[in-house]
Amino acid sequence: MEMRAFPVMAEPGSRWAEQGWEQRGGKLSRDGGVFRFSAKKIGEPDSYPGVFREPAVRDWREADGFSFAIYWPEERLAVFGIRVDDSRKQPVYAERFQKELNVTQGWNQILISRQELARTSGGRPMRLDHVTRWGVFLVTAETFDYFLLSEVRLGQPEKD
């Protein structure tokens, strides 16, 4: 079902999107039309809490971007990391795509261009024909209750 939904990478309303997540420092659930990531222990910081997923479709060469939205309920700024791997190993920072973004209270639209995705943090060309994992995580080591994620897709966000 996930392959048929492509270029959608995660859709909160679908049954297939409940499975296949690696969850760190919290628990992912569906909350209406969004994903909700709740802290494992409210009031206690965890290192790099977030979610990761292996895509059913690994060839991203035709994608013109990677888009979704993050809802951050807190008044204070948070730094989120977006990560894409082209290796089954746990690649070090320089050998994967990673972008850090400042997120403010409310909904934050995230759009990563194809040009950005085409290079690892160390400058090597990404193997966009062999994407093995992508993820969203909180970089700042702070306490939080939850954050929300919208539908995740390759390409531009759909207009309402």
Image (tube, rainbow, N blue to C red):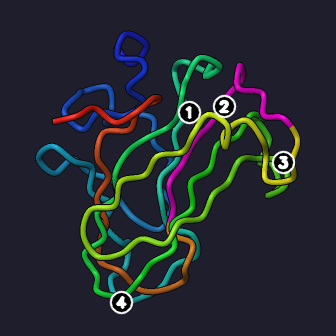
Find out whether the residues at labels 3 and 4 contact each other: C-beta distance under 8 Å.
no
Q: Marks 3 and 2, Cα distance to the nearest angstrom?
A: 13 Å
Q: Amino acid at mark 2?
A: Thr
The overriding secondary structure of the stretch rendered in magenta is loop
**Highlighted range, magenta:** 125-137
Name the secondary structure under disc 3.
helix
**Upstream in the sequence, badge 4 or badge 1?**
4
What whole-number distance in Å separates the C-alpha atoms at marks 3 and 1? 17 Å
- The residue under label 1 is 54
Residue for badge 3: 95
User: Gap in Å between the C-alphas at discs 4 and 1?
Assistant: 30 Å
List the residue tagged with mark 2.
132
Which x, y percent locates residue 16? 32, 26
Describe the element under mark 2 as helix, strand or loop.
loop
C-alpha gap between disc 1 and disc 2: 6 Å
- Nearest to the eye among marks 2 and 4: give it: 2
The kind of residue tagged 1 is Glu
**Viewer-side residue, 31 vs 94:** 94
The residue type indicated by label 4 comes to: Gly
Numbered badge on residue 128: none
Please name the amino acid that badge 3 sits on: Glu
Q: Which residue is mark 4?
A: 43
Q: Earlier in the sequence, mark 2 or mark 4?
A: 4
Residue drawn at x 52%, y 78% is 46
Q: Classify mark 4: helix, strand or loop.
A: loop
Pointer 3: residues within 10 angstroms few (<14), some, or many (20+)? many
Residue 59 figure quarter: top right
